[in-house]
Amino acid sequence: MLLEVVTYQVKEGVSEEELIKLSNNFEMILKRDIAGFVRRELTKCIDSNRWIELLWWDSESSVKEALVKVTTTEEFAQYCEILVDNGGEDIKYFSEVSISHESVKMD
């Protein structure tokens, strides 16, 4: 499993409702058309215009395929249009690490 973490800001004047609508449209494309997409969460910083998008993928190859397919869709273009462009510097990928919870002792 691979976790994609994207942090961004929304352009000034864009409402939270508009962001959520476009975000949902984008997610529909992921669910419908992209193999290997597992799930997605969108979170907002409580005291600033900062958002974190978490996307789970079944493999690195799924992410690569998604980048090719998704970037050609109108839904992706509309979603990106409302975001502050930082050249993709705030996109990171993390691999899953298994932890045994039995080894953690709590008093």
Image (cartoon, rainbow, N blue to C red):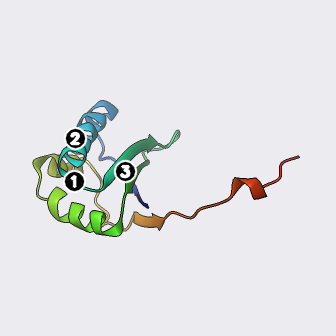
Residue at x-position 11% and y-position 58%? 72
Q: How many angstroms separate mark 2 from mark 1 (CA)?
A: 10 Å
Relative image position of residue 32 (x, y in whole percent): 19, 44
Q: Residues within 10 Å of mark 2 (few under 14, many from 20)?
A: few
Relative to residue 94, is residue 37 drawn left or right? left
Q: How many angstroms separate mark 3 from mark 2 (CA)?
A: 22 Å
Residue identifier under label 2 = 28
Q: Is residue 1 above or below residue 30?
A: below
Residue at x-position 25% and y-position 34%? 21
| Numbered disc 3: secondary structure | loop
Q: Nearer the viewer, residue 83 or 1?
A: 1
Residue kind at label 3, given as amino acid type: Gln
Q: Nearer the viewer, residue 24 or 14?
A: 24
Residue identifier under label 3 = 9
Relative to residue 28, is residue 96 drawn left or right? right
| Numbered disc 2: secondary structure | helix
